[in-house]
Image (tube, rainbow, N blue to C red):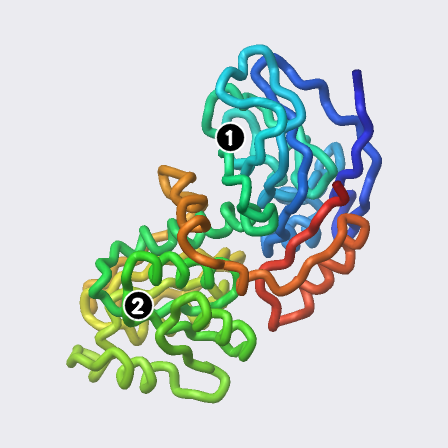
Amino acid sequence: MSSTIKQVRVHGPGTVRLDLVELPECGPRDAVVDIHACGICGSDLGYVRLGGLAGPGPEPMPLGHEMSGVITSVGSEVTDLRPGQRVVVHPGRDDIGRIGNGSPEGGLANAVLVRDAAAGDRLFPIPDDMPFEIAALAEPLAVGMHAADQADLSPADTVAVFGCGPIGLAAIATLADRGHTSVVGVEPSATRRRIAEDLGATATIDPANEDVWKQLRHLHGSRPGMAGETPATAGFIEATGAGAVLSGIIDNAGRGARISVVAVHYTPVPVNFLRVLTGELTIRGSIEYPPRFRDAIDLLERRDLTPLITHRFPLDRIEDALATLRQDRECGKILVETDH
């Protein structure tokens, strides 16, 4: 029996609509989840701008990959899940499609079909007392967590996180949870700097009004290098997406520093490889999640990430939600909630 749901879809460059669509039939290995909360991401703005995953496709593209909700039905081969369970949806599987990232499914909807739920790595039960809006933070938290992993740091290491949007803030929360006691957030937004401190940053720097590298030398100490005195910062997480920021980190990082790049850089960034060479820098990309996705949910159980959420919108106001993300440089995570 088919059912009609509301689903946010991209119809072309700059065109987003809340459509009525038929929910696909639940197959023997699938599950259906009623969505209660779904975050929106900077990558969603990219899809809207392009008109789809990499441009307009043959069909409108559903959005939404940061979601939580309640299982309403499961297929006959799904043995470890049951209707009524509260869950986080893992959106990423190349072999069967990524929810909200080019597949026919998207989490900005009343409900979503989760294909191959029987595999055991798509749906993760959450505690009864965990709010759905907090559970929906699991996906961006996992992205920030993996960025921290890619920096390959120990708790004694000093760290600077450039960009305190939701992913940078998630990395800060991860580092704080792991016992780091010298984490600096670099961010022009006063609101985001405050959130960074709420989530565990020990200091913040306003790059619009302060000399970032002088402040890092003050906070983390300095060491001599071929290019002069450099901060003794052991690790950097680049979460701004600004090429000049990444180039600046490479030009100013101290010897042996490790740089994790989690922001999306849509255009090539000039790299001073003489600095990479003489500084023996390590630069690693970071995409998606740690091997154990549940680590993000476990962290949500241990720490209060409520300060990360700054805006909430109903599904019917998706255009307002996207406009806020596009225009408000002070916002943290924006959540879309459905009526249940």
Residue tagged 1: 122
**In which quadrant will I find the N terminus?**
top right
Identify which residue, 187 or 177, lies in the foreground: 177
Residues tagged 1 and 2 counted as in contact (Cβ below 8 A): no
Expressed as whole percent of the image width and height from the top left, the position of residue 219 reads 28, 81
Q: Residue at x 60, y 35 (%)?
A: 99
Q: Residue at x 81, y 44 (%)?
A: 18
What is the distance, in whole Å, between disc 1 and disc 2 at their CAs? Answer: 32 Å
- Compared with 95, 148 (above or below) is below
- Tell me if 129 is positioned left or right of 148 in this view: right
Q: Residue at x 68, y 34 (%)?
A: 34
The quadrant holding residue 151 is bottom left
> For the residue labelled by badge 2, is the local secondary structure a helix, a strand or a loop?
strand
The answer to whether any part of residue 91 appears in the image is: no
Q: Residue at x 78, y 43 (%)?
A: 11
Could you tell me the amino acid type at mark 2?
Val
Q: Residues within 10 Å of mark 1 (few under 14, many from 20)?
A: many
Expressed as whole percent of the image width and height from the top left, the position of residue 299 reads 40, 50
Could you tell me the amino acid type at mark 1?
Arg
Expressed as whole percent of the image width and height from the top left, the position of residue 12 reads 77, 46
Q: How many marks?
A: 2
> For the residue labelled by badge 1, is the local secondary structure a helix, a strand or a loop?
loop
Disc on res. 159: 2
- Compared with 247, 65 (above or below) is above
The answer to whether any part of residue 340 appears in the image is: yes
Identify which residue, 126 or 25, lies in the foreground: 126
The quadrant holding residue 251 is bottom left
Task: Point out the frontmost of discs 1 and 2.
Answer: 1
Q: Residues within 10 Å of mark 2 (few under 14, many from 20)?
A: many
Expressed as whole percent of the image width and height from the top left, the position of residue 208 reads 50, 84
Identify which residue, 199 or 317, lies in the foreground: 199
